[in-house]
Amino acid sequence: MRFVVSALFLLVIFSYAAAFDPLDPNGNITIRWDIMSWTPDGYVATVTINNFQMYRHIMSPGWTLGWTWAKKEVIWSAVGAQTTEQGDCSKFKGNIPHCCKKTPTVVDLLPGVPYNQQYQNCCKGGVVGAWGQDPSASVSAFQLSVGMAGTSNKTVKLPRNFTLLGPGPGYTCGKAKVVPPTIFLSPDRRRKTQALMTWNVTCTYSQLLARKNPSCCVSLSSFYNETIVPCPSCSCGCHNKDSCVKSNSKILSMVGVNTPKKDNAPLLQCTHHMCPIRIHWHVKVNYKEYWRVKVSVTNFNYRLNYTLWTLVIQHPNLNNVTQVFSFDYKPLVPYESINDTGMFYGLKYFNDQLMEAGPFGNVQSEILLKKDINTFTFKEGWAFPRKVYFNGDECQMPPPDTYPFLPNSAHQNLLSFSALVSTLIFLLIAIW
């Protein structure tokens, strides 16, 4: 019994630790409900999904939001979103609700819907950008008309058991909490109005809940060593090994091979690492006061292209970035005293979309860094990143003892060994 209790305790602690991202300690998705007006049997609410994560966005096919009603509420109508199921509305005559389920599931509308179905910040197919990448794209909203509910602040019961898929698992949502009403400004910004009632739900992300294995890996190389350190074998698990295809397979010429499946099952190129994404870090040139790195991102998934992708790299010399040539760059400084992390993402309309595996499934850039004479060195793998994240998930790094080393280190060891042998021979001759 003691062992079981201890195991459960460690599991809880580990789960909470995994949901905390040290590179984005305040990152979360906040779902805000604002009651804008009362109706004879309920209320009209605006639901806003704010992504406050610096480098993790919700990609296609988008978010899915669910909850459980506290009473017997129904959704009379929805603008800017829709429920996936209507449920049993047989007891209603005349006006039929949009959804009668106790546990509704809501999804965003697709782009191009009629104007009378649109709402502000809606209709993007559920895609929500990262706050650090584009704050204006990090919001999604819709409006609900809720019936058979409370008609005042005292009689309204908050929904519970919120769930968020973005688009897959990984998010854990807390309880709804009543907060001070949201303040709204008029278009001329001269008048303030406020919601009748507001509550928030906070959802945090855990990579361990999202998937068992990493979704990306890192390979390394340098100009001073001809060794290319590949991604570790089965970095992302080898469970897709039986369904992968070779780069010259005839299957790739079939029509519809690049069409995503409903379950988002990948079609990976056969590699030793079996990852959909590989990031390669190459130490390219060494100047007197600067050094240059080339970063390449390769997609090995034939069924998925990555829109609004982000790449986060942790390295001590990122506190002195001189120029980034083909990516946008933004320093991440969650702790004011430490500036060693940067976010890289594609230039709009140029390389902000990483295409599916194939000749165009690659984006790359070069980074020029200024040296700090007090810390700069090529020894002991200092020139390689400490951590790498792609789309918010940490990538599998090679073991540190495999990093490319300086060629003269081998000669230095050989010289030390030769000197030791010479010393021993000299002592033996002297004693003899």
Image (cartoon, rainbow, N blue to C red):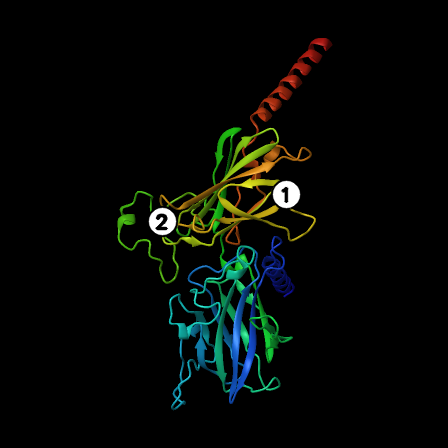
The label nearer to you, 2 versus 1, is 1
In this rendering, is residue 209 above or below 77?
A: above
Crowding at label 2, few (<14), some or many (≥20) Cα neighbours within 10 Å? some
Q: Position of residue 230 (x, y in %)?
A: 47, 39
Task: Please name the amino acid that badge 2 sits on.
Answer: Cys
Q: Helix, strand or loop at disc 2? A: loop
Task: Please name the amino acid that badge 1 sits on.
Answer: Asn
Crowding at label 1, few (<14), some or many (≥20) Cα neighbours within 10 Å? some
Residue drawn 50% across and 61% down?
137
In this rendering, is residue 279 above or below 162?
A: above
Mark 2 vs mark 1, CA separation in Å = 40 Å
Quadrant of the frame with the N terminus: bottom right
Residue drawn 41% across and 52% down?
239
Q: Helix, strand or loop at disc 1? A: helix
Residue 420 badge = none
Residue 244 badge = 2
In this rendering, is residue 398 above or below 11?
A: above
Q: Is residue 7 visible?
A: yes
Lower sequence index among marks 2 and 1: 2
Closest to the observer, 234 or 46: 46
Q: Is residue 175 visible?
A: no
Quadrant of the frame with the C terminus: top right
**Which residue is under mark 1?**
319
Q: Position of residue 413 (x, y in %)?
A: 61, 24
